[in-house]
Amino acid sequence: MLSAETPKKLFLLDAYALIYRAYFAFSKNPRVNSKGQNTSAAFGFTNVLIDVIKNEKPTHLAVVFDPPGGSAHRQEEFVAYKAHREEMPEDIRSMIHPIKQIVEAFNVPILEVPGYEADDVVGTVAKMAEKRGFTTYMMTPDKDYAQLVSENIFMFKPGRGGNPPEILGVKEVREKFEVERPEQVIDILGLWGDASDNIPGIPGIGEKTAKTLIAKYGSVENLIDHAHELKGKQQENVINFAEQGRISKMLATIICDVDVEFKEEELIMCDVNTEKVLDIFTELEFRTLAKRVISTVPPSEIDVVIPIPESSRPSATQLAHLLGVPYREGFVKNRYVGRTFIMPGQGVRKKSVRQKLNVIGSEFKDRNVLLVDDSIVRGTTSREIVQMARDAGARKVYMASAAPPVRFPNVYGIDMPTPEELVAHNRTIDEVRELIGCDALIYQDVDAMKQAVRSAVASGAAHLDGFDASCFDGVYVTGDVSAQDIVRLNEKRVGSEEGAEDNSRLALPNASE
């Protein structure tokens, strides 16, 4: 929870600069899924987003997009501004919508202002944030942003090939551009020009010469006023292209008074919508990224992985290994209490859970724990176990299910409850999380589960035509099961009403009762 004492750390991501960078990083080995989609741009950008959240731990975050049509102001002043740029590659264009969906699923706000480039929106918000006590990091590979750097505003250039990011503060900008003040970067760009944006600059003046001239004269305007001190062709060019130099400086200047409202409460980092993210990742076939989301957000800090014995131990050990956190046995199983799975009455199940499992308090106290279960069906057992973990002193309790959400009854041999008793039936994952009472809930993905089975089978040279995943996806493979059939079957089931008196031999009092 963000408190008044928490240092406010804002990251502003220049969307298109990072998207293009990600796309071309995969140019020699593009990522193409089974549908033929080139997903390089989306994959690379999402990796960057996850890395920022995981490694930099911002308190506030926003992704800033260029609007359709670009900068109206600069185009009015200079028609040729960015006019030479090639049209956006289709492989990038096709990924813009999925990228925006991913950003929204991460609960990160998107900023986009008609008529103003992302640079201008970032500059405006960064300056506003500075006045409110923020430390702001402008995440971009674009050198233009160096002009905005101050004591509390930094450039953050993501690293390549596993290298760390490059962070530019006032000292680094002064050294890199050989200027006294970061804002003089505008003057260097005005003289030097920028071929990528079609900013002409002054002919004959490159990067090195621009730095030398600004170091001596301080600004484009002062250089023009003292053009008579120059010699030869350089003097001629500065005099003849003085207006072009002034326009180039204007084009290179990031606007910091865009009409955008700075609502810092809307930029606060929130838990990711895991269900939506995994849905999008499944569609794009981002299997490795799905694993990263599970391990990164929302439970970004996990102290220990604890299985619910005994069937979840294999999953828990693998997950602990994947996350790089300790595996611990936090529950001791009482083998003289029957399986809660086969108990139809919720009242029976609730009592029996605490009889069946004893807590090892030292494994929970003052820790963020990730509990792993083989499945979550009714949710009663999970809810009790989460509460037991909290009673034992756990700070936060996360829950992971090795099975996907059980949303439909099973009719093939195992007595599963009616749809209304299934905790995931007609509920979102977040709604299930609230009912269970955990701080985060992570489910296995149906398609990922099928793919894992296919891979295992293929390695054994066997063949599979399909799967029965009816309790997860509602597809009954025999083709002869209808909703009416399920109603009829469940009418014959023997169960007990919640809250009814429990006369079974399992209804033994707890030691604490």
Image (tube, rainbow, N blue to C red):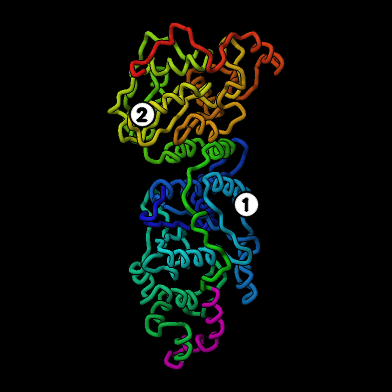
Image quarter where the C terminus lies is: top left
Res. 455 visible in picture: no
Depth check: 138 or 340 in front?
A: 340
Using a 10 Å C-alpha cutoff, classify the residue at mark 2 as few (fewer than 14 neighbours), some (14 to 19) or many (20 or more).
some
Q: Residue 390: horizontal and vertical position, in percent?
A: 37, 31
Residue that label 1 marks: 93
Work out how far the residue at label 1 is from the one at label 2, CA to CA, in angstroms.
51 Å
User: What residue do we see at 61% from left, 22% from top?
Assistant: 420
Q: Residue 458: horizontal and vertical position, in percent?
A: 51, 21
Q: Is residue 98 above or below residue 61?
A: above
Q: Residue 322: horizontal and vertical position, in percent?
A: 38, 33
Q: Is residue 243 above or below residue 181?
A: below
> Is 137 within the magenta?
no
User: What residue do we see at 38% from left, 35% from top?
Assistant: 323
Helix or strand or loop: what does disc 2 sit on?
helix
Res. 173 visible in picture: yes
Dominant SS of magenta comes to helix
Helix or strand or loop: what does disc 1 sit on?
helix
In the image, what residue type sits under mark 2?
Asp
Side of 281 where 331 appears, left or right: left
Using a 10 Å C-alpha cutoff, classify the residue at mark 1 as few (fewer than 14 neighbours), some (14 to 19) or many (20 or more).
few
User: What residue do we see at 42% from left, 76% from top?
Assistant: 184
Boundaries of the magenta span? 228-251
Residue that label 2 marks: 391
In the image, what residue type sits under mark 1?
Arg
Q: Residue 228: horizontal and vertical position, in percent?
A: 45, 93
Furthest-left residue in this view: 362
Q: Earlier in the sequence, mark 1 or mark 2?
A: 1
Furthest-bottom residue in this view: 228
